[in-house]
Amino acid sequence: MVRRAQPERTCVGCRKRAPASELLRIVAVGDEAGHSLRPDPARRLPGRGANLHPGPACFAQAVRRRAFGRALRVAGVPDHGELAKYVDAPSFTSGQPDRTGVASKVGRPT
């Protein structure tokens, strides 16, 4: 049986390549105030997507670099409030499997 290669994507925060199944897809949704970022763990929302490691470190790096606007091709700075709540949720920092089914290594003792 032939094994297929997993699709790889680049994290907009740390710029490292990883299998798409390990990354969280982010989409920009337009509203009256501009664009807001929404997590898409099921990878089903329409529109252009950006990928991010599901942890606070990569999220902070992407916000600092203003990478979401460039990756999603939106003018201005998109609102990342809802995405920040999703990324800072306890399931991401406890080492338990997160909403995408991949265990997060953030906050795990070494």
Image: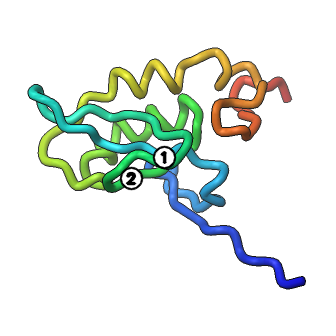
Residue 91: image x %, image y %?
A: 67, 21
Q: Could you tell me which secondary element the residue under label 1 belongs to?
A: strand
Occupied quadrant, residue 57: top right
35 sits left or right of 101 in the view? left
Residue named by callout 2: 49
Residue 81 in which image quadrant: top left
Number of marks: 2
Q: Residue at x 56, y 58 (%)?
A: 16
Q: Which residue is mark 1?
A: 25
Query: Label 1 is placed on what type of residue?
Result: Arg
Drawn side of residue 100 relative to residue 13, left or right = right
Q: Residues within 10 Å of mark 1 (few under 14, many from 20)?
A: many
- Is residue 52 in view from this perspective? no
- Residue for point 33% across, 55% down: 48
Q: Residue furthest top?
A: 90
Measure the alpha-carbon separation of dots 1 and 2. Answer: 6 Å
Residue 22: give x, y in percent of width and height. Answer: 66, 49
Query: Which color scheme did the rendering employ for the protein?
Result: rainbow
Is there CB contact under 8 Å for labels 1 and 2?
yes
Picture coordinates of residue 82 (x, y %)?
37, 22
Classify mark 2: helix, strand or loop.
Answer: strand
Of the 4 image quadrants, the one containing the N terminus is bottom right
Vertical order, 85 against 63 (above or below): above
